[in-house]
Amino acid sequence: MPTLPPRDHAGAGPAPSTPVATQEPTTPWVVRLILPALFSILMILILRRVVRIDGLESLWKIAKVLLGLGFVIFIHELGHFLLAKWCDVHVQTFSVGFGPALPGCSFQWGETLYKIALFPLGGYVKMIGEGAEEDDNADDPRSFKKKSVGQRMAIISAGVVMNVILAGVCFSLVYQLHGVKRAPAEIASVEAGSPAWEKGIPSGALIDRIDQIDHPYFDDLLPKVMHSQAGENLTLVYETRSQPPKTVEIEPRRRKGDDQPLIGVRQPDQLELVEKKVRQTGLPPVLVESAADHATPSFGFGDEIIATTDPDHPSEIKELPPNPFAPQLKDCHEFYQRLVQLEGKEMVIQVRRAGAAPQTPPVNIRVPASYHFTFGMRMRMGQITAIRDGSMAAAKEAELRAKKESLEGDIINEVEVAEADGHKTRFVTARSEPDPAAANDNVKVVEIDPMRLPYELKQWAGRQKGPKTLALTVLHGVGRKRLRFELPWDESWRFNREMQFTPSDPLSIPELGLAYRVECKIEAVEPNSPAAKAGLKEGEVIEAVRYREWDAVQKQTVPGSQWYELEMDQWAWSFAAVQRDDFKQVTFRVKRDNQPVEITVAAQPDETWPLAERGLLLMPDLRLQKANGLGSAIVLGFERTGNMIVQTLQQVRAMLTRRVSATKTLHGPISISVFAYHFAGEGFFEFLNFLGIISVSLAVINFLPIPLLDGGHMAFLIYEKVRGRPAPEQVQVFLMYLGLLIILSLMFFAFYVDWRHWDILKFLFGK
């Protein structure tokens, strides 16, 4: 008679990709010994690397991780054990981990052997009458198989129930004793061309409601958007600092290159520089080579920004006002507005040093002007891809749609503006020859990089008084005929923070309400520029880009581990990444004579092109949500547990329907270890909160209807309860081995995802 593979009791982590291990005594030796051994060797190598980076302090963090994860597994197995004992089932072994017991970590108490095993990849409870030993104990009244279906269901589900209870207790304790740090649903910046951008949701807005969730936090938005279905609209209510609440219907986007559905908003920062533990060892609390990096005196970790130069009176220092949505904090949105107003000028940023006594005077730090880092090459203009609702461009778009035409897909060819002295400036993108009919001695023609066009138009608008209008010429439709029309300039969008979050994002002109792509094809190379000296040539197409990164052990920059493959029209994101990165040396891959060629270029600051951002790295705005009492803490804790169960199941559904990318959103054991290590260094309550998340995830994943998992066994028992007899043994054998195949596949997939994400070889064996 064929032998049934045993049921699994516990995995080691919180995501569907996390490898799970089967009950040890009758599991194939590959799963039972080799895989846990390989995992343990990998963990030892990671330990070696971490100690080299963080020193001996890392040993205590790692010990906390092992104790915490071991406790979660212990609670899961304790549930199975207690229900088995309560149902009078003979339990032979209670093990945390697999393989042989650690020295001094096993003992016999009554009929059960208790042990902590060598390989910490799960655990098991071995019962008489379960798995391969069923036939040998067929007549034992205390055999697992002799118990009623209801009793077996209780034993099977007990581990999951205990994990759910543990999560609720962990969350409740955190809410009661400390509070949970959560990001408010304020919008720091908007992704250019995104659904939020198209609906006209501005930066600085506060989201009051999304569907049925009132007063959400940012982490309430993420799962709501991520788990939406294709074509589904979400109702979103937001308010700004100057306008009453507004309701919009918004459809999350999932386009090529997106890991998951999104609406295109970024959570807020607070006016505090990054803490030392957040920044890589050896780097300052600001971007390297940025204006803030050249400030006098230097910025320090944890400095709090409280005042800046007054844009209206540059010789004075003006305190930042409170955030109207959170009066206890300074207004980060106002700070960004001042950066825009002081663009291209030296400014003073006043800070309160981290840890300084209240009576200690603040420190004035002089920050020089900041400039874009450029390569000295002009790129090719791409197509218009997005029009913002209610914008000046939207009116023209509506006019064209009445003729069954559209601005989207058109290419900006020229932008003509009237200067204060009466002459005109015509910005030509060099996509095609200028219109001879538009030639005029009173017009100054400027060939311009599409990346620089929004800045030049802002400069023009700043020189004018009163209402402003410009003339836009596009290459329209399939035939690319010239279409010229006038657009008013909407100054109210001057301070809207619009950014490129993903490679597919376009570049926007906020005051016009349109966004366009910039191609990776080089239109021209300036003589003696970094691009010219490196050997880049006109007409070449940049196919991939690699950025420099910091090696915390060597304390120096090294070539990045990842090449970013670029589509033809993804230059805007690539250029923006240079401005936001610490290191400005970039390697491009172009094709010459059908052969890939790598060219390294060091971008240089362009003092004709100021940048509002000064290179300050700010901490995320996280606010404590704390319970008012024990009852409130319990409600909040178990409510969060329930929400996480639903969200995890929605995540599984989204991956199965390919609405969410499994390779980009799942985490395997290496990632889980890294996250656990990070939270172990954050503090007790942050780590306790993380253990609650792990416990919920372990419960949900173990109860999925996959043979060998608790959920798979529950499915067999439901079948037996409904039909009055067990499923045919041949069917059970087939499904059990199918379950083993699924679990092994998930295990290898999890390692593959982690391997790619963390560049394990470089991490483990880098100098």
Image: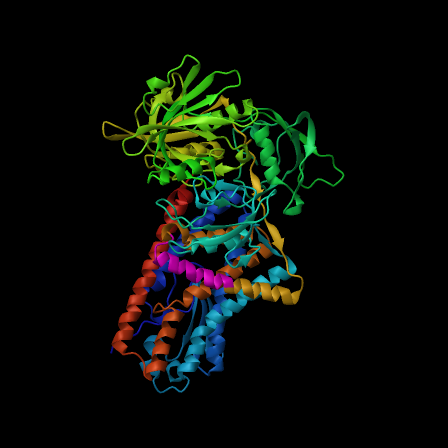
Residue 264 sits above or below residue 733 on the image = above
Residue 698 sits above or below residue 342 on the image = below
Side of 668 relative to 188 (left or right):
left
**Residue at image coords 26%, 71%:** 734
Side of 261 relative to 273 (left or right):
left
| Farthest residue, direction left | 593
The number of callouts visible is 0
Query: How far across and down, in percent of the image, does residue 502 sit?
Result: 41, 41
Query: How far across and down, in percent of the image, does residue 37 sit?
Result: 38, 58
Magenta residues? 643-660
Q: Which is nearer the eye, 492 or 42?
A: 492
Q: Which is nearer the eye, 743 or 387?
A: 387
Main secondary structure of the magenta stretch? helix
Side of 737 relative to 718 (left or right):
left
| Residue 75 visible in rendering | no
| Residue 649 visible in rendering | yes
| Farthest residue, direction right | 359
Quadrant assignment for the C terminus: top left
Query: How far across and down, in percent of the image, does residue 407 sit?
Result: 37, 36
Q: For residue 748, what is the image quadrant?
A: bottom left
